[in-house]
Each structure stands twice: as structure tokens, then as C-alpha cells.
Image (cartoon, helix red, strand yellow):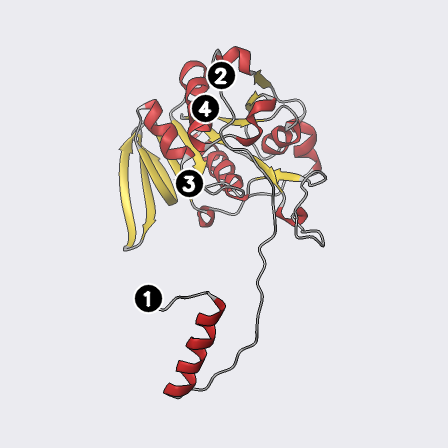
Amino acid sequence: MPNIICCFKWVVDEAYIKPSSSGKIDLEWAEYKLSDYDRNAIEEAVQLQEKYGGSVTAVTVASSDATKGIKDALSRGPEKAYFINDDQFENLEPSQTSAILAKVIGDQIDYDLIICGEGSSDMYSQQVGPRLAEKLGIPCIAFVNQLTIEDNRIIAERKTDDGLEVISAPLPALVTVLPDINSPRVPGLKDTLAASKKPVIEIDLEDLGSEYERLLIDEGLRAASMERNCSRFGAGPEDIKAFVEAVRKTGVIDRG
């Protein structure tokens, strides 16, 4: 019966990302949500538990005000959560997130399988899962869309540019899953109420015994803009030549 860890991230809800008339984006009043990709990771962990038994533990690194994310994750099926939190963890670089996760998981949590989303809804770096596996010294299989466990091994079907690939690896191991691996359940009222009673182990910066300098700093956010000049041109060589010359005059392309 495998002990499964699912990692998740609490991110800004894209529905609240709207520019002002000046083009600036202010996230002060934005709502947050569980990263879409991590919902698949949690769902897959719970489905594997329902099939093979064992336990599911949710783990996140976040700022101290991300308590709603813990409740949301627990309402989707995990039995308990590790909340690694500090105000400095609001804008971590992926290498830092994976280092913190590796320290806590390696030192404090018994695991056979770690499941991560393929990326996060905000940065989508796709680095945390592979970096975490490297730091823990365990196999990593990325972009998985089907997963089974047999004889203390995982058998994963993953998507590649060339098609589908089936890989087997011994446990403990880590996988990152694609959105099409499952359809995440929607928690009901009973699930949300039950989540409030599940254990949450809090770990702060002092417990980690290390400093994590903020490497990513938002100097400002502006919405992308696009201006159209509505230039028209025909299909003939002279028409296309005239259009290219017009574009060159704008400085978009040069004569090189």
C-alpha cells in the first residue's frame, strides 16, 4: 500500500487579472485558487489510493496567508497536509521551491510516490517536479497521462513529441501528470466541512534552519498590448514589396 505525496500551489485566479486604463495590473484585490494542473495531481493521488490503498499527503510551500489553499486541497481527498509557510515564500524561484520541498519531504515524510502537476498555472516553469526528484535521488517520469502500480514499481504512459511512451520505474519515484490524466472531482459541502478536521502540519522558516533570499521580485505588471495599422496588400510581387517597405519604415524589421 503506497504512501503518496501530492504537491500543489496556491496561485492567482486568472479571472482577476485585468488591466486598468493605464495598462497596469494590480493584484492587490485578486482572489487565489488551487493551480489547475495541481488539481490533476491531487486527483490522481486520491484515485491511486482508492485503487491500491495506502495514504495521501498534500504538501505546499506558500506564504502564511494561503490557508484557504490547504482547506481546498484537503477537501479533494488527501488525509493530511504539510503547510510549509513564511511571508518570504510568496514569490519563490523554482529551484528554491524544490529545495524546500526536498528538505521537508526527505526529512519528515514517509513516501513511495510523489505526484506533481506538469507545471503551475502562474509560472508554468515545469521545473519543480524534476528538480525535486533530483534532490531526493529518485526516478522522475514527466508528462504522464496514465499511471499504474505493480510489484513495487510504477508503470507510466507519457506523451512525447514522437507519440506515446511506456516507462517502468522502481518506487520510490516522482511523476508529473498531464491535465488529461483525469477529471478532478468538485468538492461538496460535506468534503469542505471534513477538510477542516484533517490534520495540518505547519513548518516555518525557523524550522527549516535555512535562509531563502527572494530571487524573483515584481517591479510591476503591465498588460500586453497590440496596435493594428490595418495595412492591406495584394498578392502580386509589387504589392508584397510595397508592404515590406512600409513595415521596414516602422522599424519592426531592418534591411539586413
Mark nearest the camera among 3 and 1 is 1
For image coordinates 68% across by 40% down, the residue present is 31
**Disc 3 or 2, which lies upstream in sequence?**
3
What kind of residue is marked 4?
A: Leu
Q: Is residue 198 above or below residue 93?
A: above
Left or right placement of residue 190 versus residue 235 in this view:
right
Which mark is on residue 101? 4
Q: Position of residue 74 (x, y in %)?
A: 59, 30
Q: Which residue is mark 3?
A: 126
Left or right placement of residue 235 versus residue 140 in this view:
right
Which mark is on residue 256? 1
Circle 1 sits in a helix, a strand or a loop, which is it?
loop
**In terms of image quadrants, where is residue 136?**
top left
**In terms of image quadrants, where is residue 81?**
top right
Residues at marks 3 and 2 touching, judged by CB atoms closer than 8 Å: no
Q: Is residue 214 above or below residue 183?
A: above
